[in-house]
Amino acid sequence: MLETLLQASFWFLLALISTIIATKLRLATALTEIAVGAIASLAIAGTGISIGENDLWIKFIASVGAIMLTFLAGAELEPDVLKVRWKETMGIGLIAFIAPFLGCTAVAHYILGWSAKASWLTGVALSTTSVAVVYAVMLELGLNKTEFGKVILAACFVNDLGTVIALGLIFSPFTTNSLIFMAVMIVVAILVPFITPKIFKKFGNKPSEFETKYLLFILFGIGALALWSGSEAVLPAYIIGMVLAGTVGKDSQLIRRLRTLTIGFLTPIYFLRAGYFVSIPSIIAAPIALLVLLSGKMITKIAGVYPVTKLFKFRHKEGMYTTLLMSTGLTFGSISALFGLTHGIIDQNQYSLLIAAVIGSAVIPTIIANAFYLPKYLLPKTKKEG
C-alpha cells in the first residue's frame, strides 16, 4: 500500500504540474498532461524507478477515465441539435473517417513500404478523432454548450463508429458474441431513457449519490459486455450518454458532480499515461517515418473535412477549427495500434511510430486550432476576454 500511495502521489504531482502549465500557457489541460507524461517517461527512463504505469489499478483508473469522459461527451449532446443538423454531423463524421482511412493506408503501403495488413491497420488507427481530447477542449472553452460544439462532438462519434466497424470487419471475425452485444445494446438504449427518469425521481437528489452509482453500474456492465464481444468499452459509453442526454444532460448539478469525479480524478491518469508511453528516443530515431504518418493523417483530414464544412456554409475559422479538431486522435487510435501489436499485425517499431503519430495528432492540431482558428465569437460570454 505504501508503494501504491507513493505512485499515486507522483501521478497527481504530474497532474498538478500539467494544470499549472495549462493555466499559464492557456492550453487545454488534456494536452499538457500528455506532454508532461511523455517528458516524465524520458526523465525516468534508465533510473529503475517504477511509477506503476502498467499496474492494474492505473490501467483501471485510466480506462474508467476514458469511459466517463466519453459518456459525458455523449450526455451533453443536444438531441434537437442533432435532428436539425444531422446532415452536417453525418457529412463531417463520415468524410473524417473515410479520407484518412484510405489515405493513410496508401501512405503506409506505398511510401513506408509496410505490408498490406499493417497498412490497413495504420489506416484504421489514423482515421480516428479523439472524443476525449475534443470534449476536454470544448469543456474548458465552454463550446460544449454551443450548437457548433455539439455538432463537432456528434461528428466525432460518427467518425469513431466508422473506425470501430472497420477494425472489426477487417481484423476481427463477427461472432455470436458480437450479435449478443448488439442485441443487448439496442435493448439497453431503448429502455434506459424511459427507466432512468423514474428511478432518479424516486431515489435521486440525496447525499447518497444514487445517480452516480446507477450510471457507473450501467457503464461498467455494458462496457464489460463490449469487451467480451471483442469491441471497446468507450463506444457503448458514448451511446448511453447520447440516449440519456435528455435526462442526465439537462441536470446541471449532476453533470457538475460527474465532471468533478472525471476531470479531477480519472482523466489526469488517462492522459498522463497516454503520454508516458511515447518513446521520445524512438521518435528521434525515425523522424521521417513519424512525419510521414502524422502528415498523412492531417493532410487527408484537411482535404476531406474542410471542403465539407464549406459545403455546409461554415465560416473560414469555424471550418478550419472543425477540421483541426477532427484531425485529433487518441483513444481509438491507441486501441487500434495496441490491437495490431498484440495480434502480430504490426511490430514493435511500427507500433511505436503509430502511437507517436496518434499522440502527436492529439496535440499539434489542437494547439494550431486554438492559437489561430478559434471562433471567439461563438464562445459563451463568461469565456470571452474583457
Image (cartoon, grey):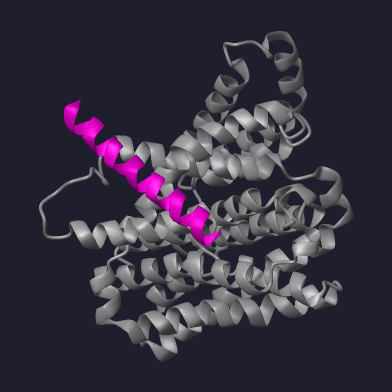
Figure quadrant of the N terminus: top left
Determine whether, in the image, residue 125 is placed left or right of residue 146.
left
Residue 99, image x and y in percent? 62, 77
**Residue at the location (31% across, 62% down)?**
341
* Whether residue 19 is situated above or below residue 220 in the rendered picture: below
**Residue at the location (43% across, 45% down)?**
268
**Residue at the location (84% across, 50% down)?**
81
Counting every numbered tag in the picture gives: 0
In-front residue for pair 110/42: 42
Residue 386, image x and y in percent? 75, 56
Residue found farthest to the bottom: 111
Residue 95, image x and y in percent? 68, 72
The answer to whether one can see residue 179 in this image is no
Residue found farthest to the front: 386
In-front residue for pair 229/27: 27
Q: Specify whether residue 11 is painted magenta.
A: yes
* Whether residue 93 is situated above or below residue 153 in the rendered picture: below
Q: Quadrant of residue 335?
A: bottom left
Residue 61, image x and y in percent? 39, 37
Q: Specify whether residue 81 is painted magenta.
A: no
Determine whether, in the image, residue 372 is placed left or right of residue 130.
right
The answer to whether one can see residue 131 in this image is yes
The region drawn magenta spans: 1-26
Q: Main secondary structure of the magenta part?
A: helix
In-front residue for pair 19/206: 19
